[in-house]
Image (cartoon, helix red, strand yellow):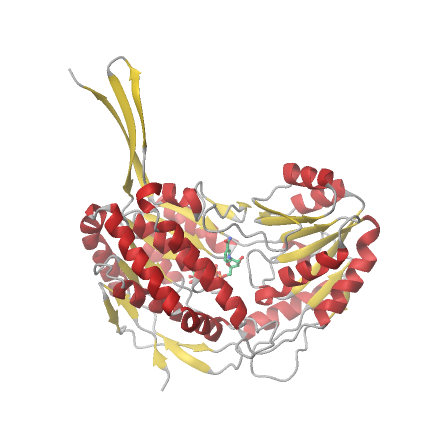
Amino acid sequence: MTERVPSYIAGRVRESAAAEAHPIPDPATGQPIAELPYSTTQEIDEAVAAARAAFPGWADTPVPDRAQVLFRFKALLEDAFEELAALVTQENGKTLDEARGEVRRGIEVVDFACGAPTLLMGSAIDQIANGIDERLIRFPVGVVAGITPFNFPNMVPLWMIPTALACGNTFVLKPSQQTPLSAVRLAELLGRAGLPEGVFNVVHGAEEAVTRLLEHPQVDAVSFVGSARVARIVYTTGAANGKRVQALGGAKNHLLVMDDADLEATVPALVASAFGNAGQRCLAGSVAVGVGRIGDVLVEELASQASALKVGPGAEPGTDMGPVIRAERKQAIARQVGGAADVGATLVADGRDAGDSDGFFLGPSILDHVTPDMEVWRTELFGPVLSVVRARDVDEAIATANRSSYGNMASIFTTSGKNAREFRRRIQAGMLGVNIGVAAPMAFLPFTGWKDSFLGDLHATGTDSIRFYTKQKVVTQRWF
Ligand code: NAD
């Protein structure tokens, strides 16, 4: 019997009343590790009601006391570090090292949120007019719904939960239906950390559950991370229902390689960016732009280093790249690679056949001479595929990257400060790297996608998140 994944409502682990359950396979074997009943509408409403009921008490809890719960949560996460990483590998497929990295990045958000008493301070000005003072103070927004993707089942929920709770909000998390296990484990640890019941809840499901949360009159704010298509649905539906929304979407990140780049250091950074997490990362470099004379040698080096990557189960020592999340994704990615070759791209590394296995493995693929009119350039494949585009100079490289409808991350590899400066000023993306393959801001700064990669005003993490999870009052005061 495989485990039926429970939800977590009002401080208790709950079996769903839903009769049907969806199998959750281990991506490395294809074998079921659990089955997931989608929460019924009644269960979702109960979770929201529990969060609503817990809100006044939690919002009134002194900020340092809320922070103490997060300090205990942090200690529990550290104690459970290896177990949490193993769980990520099991449900997502990524390597153990990648899973450890994800859990560490998630814990850093807890570290940030533990500073709530300082972060939540407002501001004041004496004598703004004769006999009048003004001050700005922050209050929690209310009930927050978090909707998260499959690719970081531990870290992305942790982008939201610690800060939302530190600010005095209560929370209903709807994790990816493909990777629901880590979320339930986080709920249990929050309970053990002493979080009052109802402050944090987990429900399960897909489109229907999200729609219920977006339309629920008792949900005040929605934090979403997922594909650009769903980000747009969540943003428009949430806003139409009067909610505060931040919606982080997909990406097509360009890595510009100038002909003055230090190739020895650059190529491993590109390979790690494109093929780490099997390319299932919103900060994956999916297009390399070879500028000037460097193109041919760059492609040769990329193909040689990519072919040396060891593809296998994430839990196996020595594995460089795990499987993708589902068999259908594997087939769709392989089709895109074949389609690009059919319309003129040169397949210099073909990862479509990764051997006999019931797991969802693909090897690394590299397509050279990709052009912006090809679907493979426009579309986020979310798999281990690197497209290479050629450009004459830095101007053409920046112009090519800027044609993308996405604007999550872009990086330049160069030894020239002038090239780096031009890039920094003119590229249309929010997270930039200079000689960095995965330019991920740490928890203390905002995760700043642009264009179709982000809809909303205030980004996830950092001081933006404090503003997203609080409402302000400005008090103008005079004493007669
Ligand atoms: P997804 O958009 O399919 O799913 C994300 C969430 O939305 C899930 O919880 C899912 O149940 C829900 N959902 C799916 N279809 C829905 C619909 N029609 N209406 C309402 N809700 C729906 O994304 P995914 O495949 O789980 O994750 C991969 C995507 O997430 C990639 O596009 C990746 O770039 C993106 N991502 C972005 C960031 C970022 O910071 N910008 C971070 C991680 C992942």
Of the pair 332 and 35, the residue shown nearer to us:
35
Task: Write the residue at 22% across / 22% down.
Answer: 477
Q: Name above or below for residue 254 compared with residue 309.
A: above
Q: Quadrant of the C terminus?
A: top left
Residue 395 to residue 317: above or below: above
Task: Judge whether 66 appears above or below 346 on screen.
Answer: above
Give the camera-side residue of 274 and 319: 319
Q: Which residue is farthest top?
A: 130
Give the image location of residue 79, x and y in percent: 37, 69
Residue 353, image x, y percentages: 68, 77
Count of labels in the image: 0
Rendering quarter of residue 197: bottom left
Image position of 176 (left or right of 287)? left
Q: Say left or right for 133 vs 151.
A: left
| Location of residue 345 (image quadrant) | bottom right
Give the residue drawn at x 40%, y 59%.
157
Q: Where does the N terminus fall, quadrant-wise?
A: bottom left
Image coordinates for residue 155, horizontal then vertical, percent: 44, 60
